[in-house]
Amino acid sequence: MYDAIIAGAGIGGLYCAAKLAKYGKSVLLLEKTPHIGGTSHIFRRGEYYFPMGPLSFSSPEIVVELLSEIGIGEKIDFNRNHFQLITPFFDIVYSQSFGKLREDLKNFFAEERQGIDAFFEKLREIISAVDKIHQWHPDYSLGKKREKILKNFIPKCEKELEIINENLQIPAKEYLEKQVSSKILQNFLGSQTTYEPVMSLTLLAFMWDFTNGRGIWYPSCTIHGINQLIYDRILSNNGEVKLSHGVKEILIKDNRVIGVQTSKGETFESDWVISNADYQKTFLELVRPQNLPQKFYSAVKSYTMSGSELCVYLGVDPQKIDLSKMRAQHVFYRKEIKSSEKFDPEDFDNREIEICLWSDNAPDSAPPGRAVILLRVGFSYDHFSDWRTGEKRRKDGYRDYKKKIAEKLIHTVESLLPGLSNSVEKMEIATPLTYQDWGNRYRGSIAGWSWNIEEQSKIGRKLLIETPIDHLLMVGICSACELFLGGYPTSMYTGNLAADYILEKSG
């Protein structure tokens, strides 16, 4: 009998296990894959290694603070990453100070000066209101911490809360259409891309603050290195970890969790179960429907999570490529912007593509004189679903199809990076099916809940750590409906909240 069983060794599960173990709780961490970290991990192909998921993260000070709480004091340096958008209409590095960005945009869109100023003033107001939101806003806390925040809530916070809530109801698209006339500028300001805005003004302010205010950073010890530090703390405090032991079912009796059954047929009993699987996988696959309130089950089934992507990993000889147009580690490139009656997902000339020079962050990811480049583009799970015949099983022809569309993607990117095709020495391809079967993401979702304003309104709550099942908690990217600290730190933060909640309740 364990005090707590954690299903999934992503960053939320790892951190929760480490903190519980630090305070003497008997902990069992079960992970389906043979490695820790979930998609915050790497894989190797020959002399190259590639990242499975996040490339960098915001709020590094939160990560360092949380690591310190579980006794990790190693010095970690952070390298800021920058972001560039290249379209047929303008080319801009947008991860710069708001003042510089504002002036650069006025040079591209001189007739929109007034609207640009109005937008950045609105951003300034909201970003000021959400500053350190996890410390003072009751909806981002649990248990005694939440009670303390509510007790000490001050009038100043009420004003900030009013600004936040008001702008949560305002679609960024609707607001920008009133401020600027250029569709290109509306899309950029509302999404940092060439696509139409879908989020609220408050969530948009979070996104701009991550990119331009707090910054996006890469740790000197690597992201998977942070995971390893936490894993070592679990073991040093007598926590138990079983890799290649996936949870098949979360066991429930009389609306209270009693343990889990693994894919190997083992049953483990516990007082608490914490799921680091995504929300829909947890409640649509790991919990029997009859153990859930029907209204809750139907709601979870109807919620929309973030989409998936096609990712092409390339080990290259950089001497054969003209990289002169890349002025940042991350370039979002769209060769053409044209409307069409029927959307063609394989028309990469008319799609926005993320190009990441990964080896800038991780020089040892490639052998000397070589480099790693990642190409990523959003892709619907349904586009690939017919190829899947079972877990990690595909129809004949799948590998050839992946290679064909990867080559089409490379061909488009080569118009920006001449010589790319001939530089490739190693290639691997991930599709939404890869994220589903190797990343254990429901329908291949890569970034938690959708930030679409309509979908956000369905969820309502900020934190989804507590569930309708007694002593069953959620942690990780899907246990918060908005990534208010960025993806990786929000996942770690929810693991901390869940651990504190258990420690409070169990004494």
Image: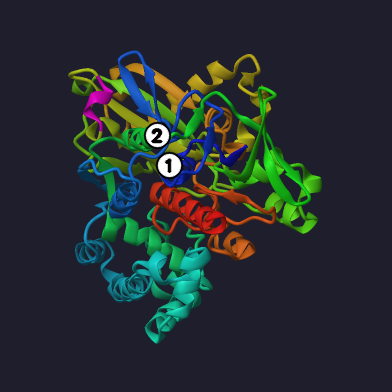
Q: Nearer the viewer, residue 430 or 298?
A: 298
Q: Nearer the viewer, residue 147 or 7?
A: 147
Asked whether the residues under the numbered discs 1 and 2 touch, taking CB atoms below 8 Å apart as contact, a structural biologist would say: yes
Q: CA distance from mark 1 to mark 2?
A: 7 Å
Q: Secondary structure at mark 1?
A: helix
Q: Which residue is mark 1?
A: 18
Magenta stretch in the rendered image: 362-366
Q: Position of residue 315 (x, y in %)?
A: 31, 21
For mark 1, does the 10 Å Cα neighbourhood hold few (<14), some (14 to 19), or many (20 or more) residues? many
**In the image, residue 89 above or below residue 177:** above
- Judge left or right: residue 241 versus residue 42: right
Q: Which residue is mark 2?
A: 231
Q: Residue at the location (50% across, 54% down)?
A: 503
Q: Residue at the location (39% across, 19% down)?
A: 427
Q: Position of residue 339 (x, y in %)?
A: 51, 50
Quarter of the image for residue 361 reads top left
Q: Report the amino acid beneath label 1.
A: Ala
Count of numbered badges drawn on the protein: 2
